[in-house]
Amino acid sequence: MIAGLSAILEQILVYATIYTLVALGIVIGGRAGVFNVGGEGIMLAAASAGFLAAFFSGSWVVGFVVGASMGAALGLLLALLHEGLGVNQFIGGIFLVIFGTGLSDLLYKVVVGVVLEAPQAPPMPEVVIPPLSSVPFLRSFLNQDPIVYFMYGAVAATWWFFYRTRLGLETRAIGELPQAADVVGVNVRRRRIIAATVGAALMGVAGAYLPIFVTGTYNPNISAGRGFMAIGIAIFAAWKPQRTIVGGLLFAAVEVVSYQLQLARPDVPFQFFLMLPFVSVLVIMVVMRRFIEFPASIGRPYRRE
Amino acid sequence: MTDSTVDVRTPARAKSGGGRAALVYLAAIAAAFAVTLLLIAALGFSPTRALRTLVTTSFRTSFGFQETIKKAIPLLFATYAFTIPFMIKFFNIGAWGQMLFGATITAVVGLVLGPLGVPRLVLVPLLLAVGAVAGGCWALIAGWLKAEFDINPIISTIMSNYVALYVLNLVATSARFRDIAEGHPMTVRLTENATIETLGGIPLSIVPALLAAVFVWFLIRHTRLGYEITAVGFNQRTAETYGINFARTILLTFFIGGALAGMGGAVEVIATQRRLIEGFATTSGAQYGMFGIVTALIVNANPVVVPLASFFMAVLLVGADALQRTMQVPVEVVFLAQALVVLFVVVARERFGGRTT
């Protein structure tokens, strides 16, 4: 059955929340100079830890707090490896992917084991804003679970921080020309470590969102490559926080539409539709490449000369 | 590590920083093992028994040894796939997809040509070449996107992995090739003339694997292209000043890396599975591409030691399976152990071993 338009919009928004939060996390670290490509591993570890916490506490809030903490811990680890020990950021990110993949299934196996009935996450409430939530179309964007609102807030707050505060200006300066920031007394390393940790915490929230809200149960490899695709969104967004939501909606739309097309066109092999999101990432990056500028010092640990 | 300094050492000399480097290396691996054994003990298993299982399973029985060789062969190809582009500092995360794509095209050609009665001595080398070209072309997409549009190969190779996964699924579930008697997506069996025999339990696909190792060693150490790759890896700008075409080097390293992965996929199809099966490139709970990256990072992408490293990694994988089978230790523990080995080795190299990539 082909879902109605409002149902499709709501589905898009759910996936957009995941993509946007991870991409936003990448942007926050990246603007300070730490390029975290380990989002997939962070999401998986946070999904497992967050789900277990939510299940045993019976509270989705606890689940998200634990998920965010798991993300923050792994982001901190990456930042320390990079800024403290000089490990290449991409190698650090690949380490996080492998580590997170192993950790997520191990945690679940050790705590839950093999059971007949998979444990279910506690239900999440729907937040309704009375007058607006009844307007058609707008309803799809507002009649949602708390994490969607959290995503809106996180994007707005990050934009405000980077472009309207002194601290944000300094953080952007660290990503562009750390020597200059250092000269005016900004602690480059500490700021980078904080930015990478906060960014990874957002990835953790996105990871926990998958089992707690989207599926209701934990499955191995639950993030299904979305942590990698979010790297494409961060680059698509040209490292601007406000644009991650545009990229998130776009990629989510491609994903949801590809599901719908599978149902609508059974004559076309469904594999072509499943390829669509991954091919789109590359096409979009080729098209957008002229408008993209990376933070100048991204990828290099800061050393005083 | 600044761009303006020229490093004139060859990789071989840069590596032989004396016994100290080797010692640091071994210490890092020992530390990673110690952490893993602590974890195993914390989970309530016997760490001594676990260590014994992990290290000796491959050597206790001939079956264990055969299994190790069977895992080492695709691992060797996957490790090279990461290693060669990494020599010019690009990350090919796509060995998995290149294997899948190479395997898929090999299976299609094998299933079409096999029944025509093409002699084995012609068909098997042809299929290996088909797998290599297919894998190479698949990787060339990422190389081209980098050379032409400056798109980070980490992203393009990961994306092409997922696309390859669906190409394989498409063929394995197609009306033309699917084995309808099986529930899991797979093609019908290849005819005898499209397969490689085993000798004493060891698949003869070890021959192409060893030939690949010799090829890579010769390429890197004794050809102009190998010299160019090494030169670009040390200093891209200097290499370009001396007339080496950087874009061409990118394309060639990705093609060669992908071709080796593709041949690995072909070998799995014609020697191990003898048909195309969805999920074939997976072992011990993860795919060969990922283990290849781990292996390559541990040896700092030194192409000469890749065969040895692949063998030892295969020993660990066979040990991990045994650990799960006999002691019910989750196989993910070994996965974490490998991540830790990478971490400790990379950190040790950064802190004590001088330069890294």
Image: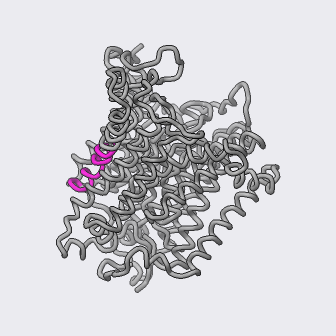
Give the magenta range.
B135-149
Residue B62 shows up from this direction: yes
Q: How many numbered discs, if any? A: 0
Residue A246 shows up from this direction: no
A223 vs B305, nearest the viewer:
B305
Q: Residue at x 45, y 72 (%)?
A: B356
The image quadrant that residue B67 belongs to is top right
Instruction: From this view, report whether residue B141 is shown above or below residue B296.
Output: above
B101 vs B59, nearest the viewer:
B59
Q: Residue at x 41, y 81 (%)?
A: A182
The chief SS type of the magenta part is helix
Q: Tell which residue pokes out farthest to the bottom in this image.
A: A305
Position of residue B300 in the picture relative to residue B45 (left or right): left
B316 is within the stretch colored magenta: no
Name the spot of residue A18 as percent of width and height, x first. Answer: 47, 41
Q: Residue at x 72, y 25 (%)?
A: A116
B279 vs B125, nearest the viewer:
B125
Q: Residue at x 47, y 14 (%)?
A: B180
Position of residue A281 in the picture relative to residue A222 (left or right): left
B284 vs A222, nearest the viewer:
B284
Instruction: From this view, report whether residue A277 is shown above or below residue B180.
Output: below
Where the N terminus of chain A falls, by quadrant?
A: top left
Name the spot of residue B29 as percent of width and height, x first. Answer: 63, 66
Name the spot of residue B157 as percent of width and height, x first. Answer: 37, 48
B142 is within the stretch colored magenta: yes
Name the spot of residue B176 as percent of width and height, x first. Answer: 36, 17
Where the C terminus of chain A falls, by quadrant?
A: bottom left
Picture colour scheme: one colour
Position of residue B175 in the picture relative to residue A215 (left or right): left
